[in-house]
């Protein structure tokens, strides 16, 4: 089983001979690596599943609460808490296109609630954030109808807020921008209207 100096061995032959000579030790190491890989793989799967479950729960909560809360002052605390939690959620940089669409929808609804209770600064801020989200979405997927619709809704809502706040000139400009976005020439698919 030893090597002979009169013969030249390739590296592959020497490796095979070493593995064969240390078969038990190699088997133990390989089994250990296999178990370690399985444990790491399972742990990664578990962490990803928990993260995805948490994201799904938060998305559903964010999507459903504005539907259930009316715009009365009694619900203002709930709406304010939801707004701040949504903003923290949106601070993430790894939002998917679907999550951005949902966030646009939630911010549009929350801004409308603030507009209904005449909280102009909060409505203005949320409509502006909605415009930022739609721009972020359109940067990822240009001419994507949900982001175009989000932009139109945010500009229309902001136009209403500005008009009610005493700046009809800015309100009119925002309405015109929203209508320009709805112009059939600007729409490549017929799904926006």
Image: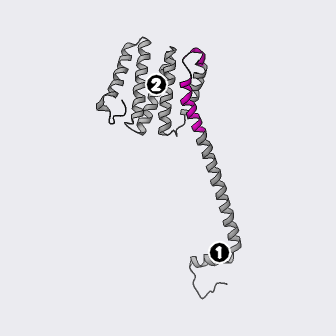
Q: Is residue 115 left or right of residue 168?
A: right
Give residue 181's quadrant in the image.
Answer: top left
Q: Residue at x 42, y 33 (%)?
A: 147
Crowding at label 2, few (<14), some or many (≥20) Cα neighbours within 10 Å? many
Quarter of the picture containing the C terminus is: top left
Query: Mark 2 or mark 1: which comes first in sequence?
Result: 1
Provide the secondary structure element on which disc 2 rests.
Answer: helix
- Magenta range is 54-76
Q: Which residue is mark 2?
A: 128
Q: Residue at x 50, y 27 (%)?
A: 107
**30 and 18: which one is in front?**
30
Is residue 72 a member of the stretch shown in magenta?
Answer: yes
Using the image, tell me which numbered label, if any, was put on residue 19: 1
Quarter of the picture containing the N terminus is: bottom right
Say if residue 31 shows up in the picture: yes
**15 and 191: which one is in front?**
191
Farthest-out residue, bottom: 6
Q: How is the image coloured?
A: one colour
Q: Horizontal and vertical percent for residue 46?
A: 64, 48
């Amino acid at each position: 089983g030893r090597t002979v100096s009169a013969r030249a061995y390739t590296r592959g032959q020497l490796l095979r001979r070493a593995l064969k000579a240390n078969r038990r030790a190699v088997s133990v190491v390989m089994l250990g690596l296999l178990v370690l890989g399985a444990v790491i793989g399972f742990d990664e799967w578990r962490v990803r599943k928990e993260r995805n479950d948490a994201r799904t729960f938060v998305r559903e909560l964010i999507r459903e609460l504005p539907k259930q809360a009316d715009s009365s002052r009694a619900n203002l605390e709930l709406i304010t808490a939801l707004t701040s939690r949504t903003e923290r959620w949106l601070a993430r940089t790894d939002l998917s296109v679907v999550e951005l669409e949902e966030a646009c929808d939630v911010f549009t609804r929350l801004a409308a609630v603030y507009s209904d209770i005449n909280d102009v600064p909060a409505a203005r801020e949320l409509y502006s954030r909605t415009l930022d989200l739609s721009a972020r979405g359109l940067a990822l997927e240009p001419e994507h109808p949900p982001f175009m619709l989000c932009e139109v809704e945010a500009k229309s809502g902001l136009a209403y807020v500005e008009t009610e706040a005493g700046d009809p000139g800015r309100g009119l400009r925002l309405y015109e921008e929203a209508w320009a976005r709805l112009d059939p020439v600007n729409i490549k698919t017929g799904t926006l209207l």
